[in-house]
Amino acid sequence: MKRKAKPLFYILVFFALVLFVGGGTWMYLASPVDRNDKSEIEVVVPSGATSTKIGTILKEKELIRSELLFKVYLKMNHVGSLKASTYKLNKTMDLNTIIETLEKGNTYNPDAIQITFREGERITSYAEEITSKTNHTYEEVIAVFQDHEYVKGLVGKYWFLTESILNPDLYYPLEGYLAPDTYQFMNADVTIDEIIDTLLKQNEKRLEPYKVTIEKDPHYYLTMASMADLEGSNTDNRMMIVGIFENRLKKGMNLGSDVTSYYGVQASMKNDITAEQLADVNPYNTRLASMAGKMPAGPICNPSNSSIQASVSPTASDYYFFVADKHGKIYYTKTASEHEKKIQEIKANGDWIW
């Protein structure tokens, strides 16, 4: 009577075939199933699942080419237990990556939420994002951002939060201090405090490379960065713009920045504002004669890393004016007459922004 071949026999036969055909076959079977398909595939590895069961699951999900190779790979690399959990995998992952993921396990949470806070946006926009992804109302979120006692408790907790943020003229004390990025939280019940703390911690990390300079006056640098962020489109022109702002401050001129006028009346940057709004008297409007030689009360948005770099490394020049056309190209001039002439040229060419 013939004896049934044991699983080890098949493994040895497989090894022999691989060696016979060549390393190319092995590499092909272990390679990603589809290098272009990054769509997430949910894989549930149940508790107590054997390597055979897991291999079958992965093959059914079309994440691996061979169940047998999967088992051989585990034995060859002395892989320990694969963790029961729910995973998000995709077809661009090769066999090694998939196995490493299953071996490490994960903390996949189906209730997790993701919130994206964009560069150059105001706290009011951040509050809207928080409201759309959590169980908090807009009014609740804004109330925390404007809570003087809460903000006071943050001073000193982070080296860049100084008493400057307690200035009563500020609309939102933490404006400019929250790091734009995409964050993940446990669920929609995450507290507003936790969200703010997470953004502040990230801001601490990104400001660290500039700490020696910024710690002299964090409020100044973040305010300058916020203006540069909305006035310029890349690091180079933002560095030039910061240099011009500093030239104007040294000469006792007002900054004349329209973006501060928009913030002062809390108008959307997507729409035009009236002459009356441009002349509104508030602690942010740098177009006012009374603001000569002065910075706005505080940041007018949460700036990008590029703008922070610009604020600490401005480009030195002898320019005092700049203007952008509707294509985003910026023109620099030295005198008021040159500046006005450039504006007329832009208008004549049909490139005026308004």
Image (cartoon, helix red, strand yellow):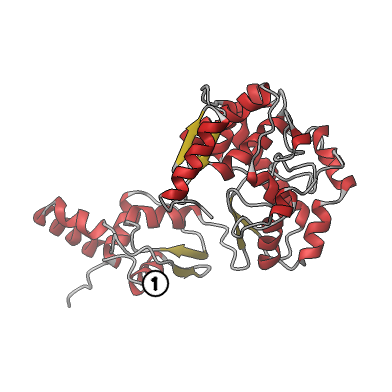
Q: Position of residue 227 (x, y in %)?
A: 62, 40
Q: Which image quarter: residue 95? A: bottom left
The residue nearer to you, when weighing 23 against 280, is 280
The residue nearer to you, when weighing 118 against 59, is 118
Q: Please, what secondary structure does the residue beneath circle 1 have?
A: helix
- State whether residue 198 appears in this view: no
Q: Mark 1, residues whose alpha carbon is within 10 Å: few (<14), some, or many (≥20)? A: some
Query: For the C terminus, which image quadrant?
Result: bottom right
Name which residue lies at 73% across and 38% down.
Answer: 296
Q: Position of residue 158 (x, y in %)?
A: 74, 35
Name which residue lies at 74% across and 64% down.
Answer: 189
Q: Which image quarter: residue 314? A: top right
Q: Position of residue 45 (x, y in %)?
A: 48, 68
Query: For the N terminus, which image quadrant?
Result: bottom left
Q: Position of residue 60 (x, y in %)?
A: 35, 74
Residue beneath disc 1: 57
| Residue type for callout 1 | Ile
